Image (cartoon, rainbow, N blue to C red):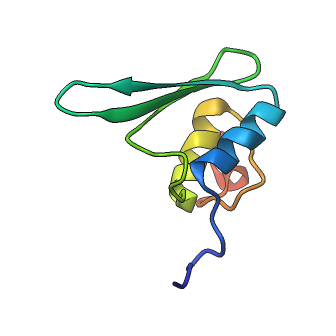
Amino acid sequence: MAHPFGSQPKLKDYLEWACSEGCDYKEGVNTVNGVTTVTTIKSPDRKHFVVVSGVQQSELLMPTYINYLDRRLNMTSPFPSWPSVENEPA
């Protein structure tokens, strides 16, 4: 299968990187109208966080989703993102 943006990381890869940078994460299950995996990631300074709902750790992350995670955590990951964080207005 071709990947238009190159090899994308899985959620577990992003979590491993985030933890190596000082982030914490918790994973749980939401059982409202079915079973949904919910992961909460907190930035190293604990001032920023993001809730990831319905994404398993083995799923690939698209560049736009990596951009979303980076923006919410106020961090710049080494993974390909689009649009890149550097090109966004302050």
Q: Is residue 37 left or right of residue 58?
A: left
Q: Residue at x 69, y 49 (%)?
A: 13
Image coords of residue 29 (percent x, y): 38, 26
Please identify the residue farthest to the bottom as the structure is shown. 2
Q: Quadrant of residue 89?
A: top right
Q: Is residue 52 left or right of residue 76?
A: left
Please identify the residue farthest to the left as the structure is shown. 33
Q: Residue at x 37, y 41 (%)?
A: 54
Image coords of residue 10 (percent x, y): 60, 55
Determine whether 44 is above or below 21 in the image. Answer: above
Determine whether 11 is above or below 21 in the image. Answer: below
Task: Pick whichever, 14 or 68, lies toward us.
Answer: 14
Q: Residue at x 21, y 33 (%)?
A: 34
Image coords of residue 71 (percent x, y): 61, 39
Q: Residue at x 26, y 25 (%)?
A: 31
Total numbered badges shown on the rendered structure: 0
Q: Is residue 65 left or right of residue 45?
A: left
Q: Is residue 89 visible?
A: no
Q: Is residue 56 visible?
A: yes
> Quick one: quadrant of the C terminus?
top right
Image coords of residue 66 (percent x, y): 59, 51
